[in-house]
Amino acid sequence: DVKVTQSSRYLVKRTGEKVFLECVQDMDHENMFWYRQDPGLGLRLIYFSYDVKMKEKGDIPEGYSVSREKKERFSLILESASTNQTSMYLCASSLLRGEQYFGPGTRLTVT
Amino acid sequence: GENVEQHPSTLSVQEGDSAVIKCTYSDSASNYFPWYKQELGKRPQLIIDIRSNVGEKKDQRIAVTLNKTAKHFSLHITETQPEDSAVYFCAASSGGSYIPTFGRGTSLIVHP
């Protein structure tokens, strides 16, 4: 059974803080993804990674960076959090071709 | 890049009715079309998918149809039940990467 976990379900941070969101998958998947989910806007891809130390920008990478030092772990970094980054963040993983498995999400509030 | 449009944004039906959600895509090279269901407070989960060499796929009360010429695909749910209430996302991806582009989602409400 695939398991994708995220480090926090809820997070409250102040404007300007550096924020780390972590995602771990236990199925040896090559691909990992970070999305943000906002009402009416669906799932928007921030970054994805198809291998260790490899990363590609998605549709909305501005203000974010990522790190993938190990195959099972993919981190999303907000270098200087802003209020417009308040959102639900979803991590996902998949094999090279196929179904995505999502984590439970982290609801981030930036005040 | 790929662009996926999904309609309607909200769909309200009575229990037992059918529900249809439609998506269009822009990239003719897209060849994988998954549908995800997200219940309130939960993570999205794949419910059905279709590949471009197939026109229709069925799984119990759920079916997906694909029209490659018109570049649209649809999700059909028959005999809806209250537990079908959720947000449904369509997606399309192309080439060898299978990185999906998602539609904006449809909130399906099934009234008992």
Image (cartoon, rainbow, N blue to C red):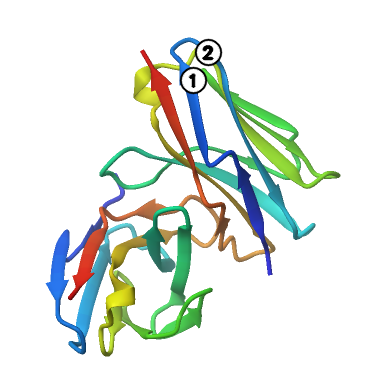
Q: Can you tell which mark lies on residue B13?
A: 1
Residue B23 seen in this snapshot: yes
Q: Residues within 10 Å of mark 1 (few under 14, many from 20)?
A: some
Q: Residue at x 64, y 29 (%)?
A: B57
Q: Which of marks 1 and 2 is in front?
A: 1
> Looking at the figure, which quarter contains the N terminus of chain B?
bottom right
- Tag 1, which chain? B
Secondary element at tag 2: loop
Residue A8 seen in this snapshot: no
- On screen, residue B103 versus residue A17, left or right, reads right
- In x, y percent, where is residue A11? 15, 67
Q: Residues within 10 Å of mark 2 (few under 14, many from 20)?
A: some
To which quarter of the image does residue B98 belong? bottom right
Q: Which residue is drawn at 46% across and 53% down?
A: A40
Q: Distance between the residues labelled 1 and 2?
A: 6 Å
- In x, y percent, where is residue A33? 41, 67
The residue singled out by tag 2 in the image is B17
- Tag 2, which chain? B
Q: Which residue is drawn at 48% across and 50% down?
A: A99
> Looking at the figure, which quarter contains the C terminus of chain B?
top left
Secondary element at tag 1: strand
Q: Is residue B3 above or below residue B60?
A: below
- In x, y percent, where is residue A68? 33, 81
Three-letter code for the amino acid on which mark 2 is drawn: Asp
Marks 1/2 in contact by CB < 8 Å: the verdict is: yes
- On screen, residue B67 versus residue B90, left or right, reads right
Q: In this view, does A54 lie above or below A33?
A: below
Three-letter code for the amino acid on which mark 1 is drawn: Val
- On screen, residue B100 versus residue A84, left or right, reads right
